[in-house]
Amino acid sequence: MISTLLPAAAVAVESTVDREIALFPEEAHQVRNAVVGRQREFTTVRWCAREALGRLGLPAVPVLPGRRGAPQWPEQLVGSMTHCTGYRAAVLAPRSEVSAIGIDAEPNAPLPDRVLDSISHPEERAWIQRLRWSAADVAWDRLLFSIKESVYKTWYPLMGRELGFEDAIVTVDPEARSFRAHLLLDREVRATGAPTWFDGRFGTSGGVLLTAIALPARQPGNPADAGRHLPSGVR
Ligand SMILES: CC(C)(COP(=O)(O)OP(=O)(O)OC[C@H]1O[C@@H](n2cnc3c(N)ncnc32)[C@H](O)[C@@H]1OP(=O)(O)O)[C@@H](O)C(=O)NCCC(=O)NCCS
């Protein structure tokens, strides 16, 4: 399902059941003290990543968290991973075609009370309110949360900077199942050539909401090819 939200250059592997693989020792070290549920999601999403590497003709490698938890991929790739109850996925794409990618999965159910206020702008709450009545098959408040998680997963590996929920204003096209996240960046960050918006797509699959962003290596109109302007040390 998630592959339908991404460009053809991306390889996506998802699983609705947990998988057993032997983790690399460095990977196993990361979850040595974790609860069983965390070990399972960590392992299964790395199974997804290895499958995706294999489909790209690449060998399995340890997929380790780098700064702020961002997964580290072979130099020539960008990638993203997500897990929620009953769903895990990893996507990879050649850096030559996609400069950044982010995916997120969330249960298709309303957010807990008061969470929406802490992650949204009034304009976003207005479209959520409207769509709640006209299109009840999607938990629109949770979708906004998922979109912002995808935004963060796209942004952070690209820029190596934090981005808060208040730093993006999201609009959605419910018919096209697409969205745009406008990034509210201060002048200093804009001057680095950072992208000022991300376009993405969303869908539902078996009780799960999926969101995905793939920033083309060249995005017309956006400060192009943000990858050129990465702060040193950030891949
Ligand atoms: C990092 C974060 C986005 C993860 O999202 P989540 O919904 O909690 O969890 P998911 O299961 O979907 O994704 C977890 C995976 O995200 C990836 N991830 C973690 N930190 C990341 C980062 N800084 N950059 C990119 N990907 C990251 C990892 O692969 C992780 O899996 P792993 O721990 O098994 O390696 C979230 O915990 C977070 O910190 N959010 C606050 C920042 C934010 O969203 N701002 C909004 C900007 S508009």
Image (cartoon, grey):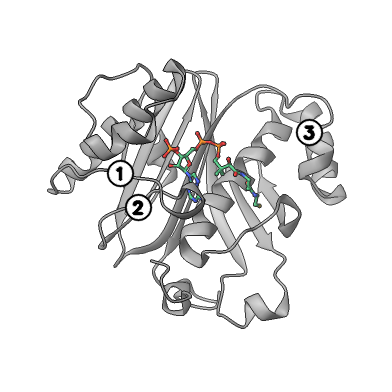
Amino acid on which disc 3 is placed:
Val
Circle 2: element type: loop
136 or 45, which is in the foreground? 45
Q: In which quarter of the image is the N terminus?
A: top left
Mark 1 or mark 3, earlier in chain: 1
Which residue is painted at 35% across and 52% down in the image?
72
Query: Disc number at residue 72?
Result: 2
Task: Mark 2 and mark 3 in contact? Answer it, CB < 8 Å.
Answer: no
Seen in the image, is 31 located left or right of residue 23?
right
Does the closest atom of ligand 1 sit within 8 Å of the Cβ of label 1? yes
Q: Spatial distance from mark 2 to mark 3, Cα to Cα?
A: 30 Å
Say which amino acid is labelled 2.
Answer: Gln
| Vertical position of residue 208 compared to residue 167: above or below | above
- Say if residue 63 shows up in the picture: yes
Secondary structure of the residue carrying tag 1 is loop
Q: Which amino acid does label 1 sit on?
A: Val
Kindly identify which numbered label has been placed on residue 115: 3
The numbered mark, 1 or 2, whose residue comes first in the sequence reads: 1
Mark 1 vs mark 3, foreground winner is: 1
Q: Residues within 10 Å of mark 3 (few under 14, many from 20)?
A: few
Q: Is residue 89 left or right of residue 152?
A: left
Check residue 63 in the rendering and tell me which mark sits there, or answer none.
1
Q: What is the spatial separation of the Cα atoms under label 1 and label 2, in whole angstroms?
A: 6 Å
**x and y, in percent, of residue 188 in the image:** 67, 80
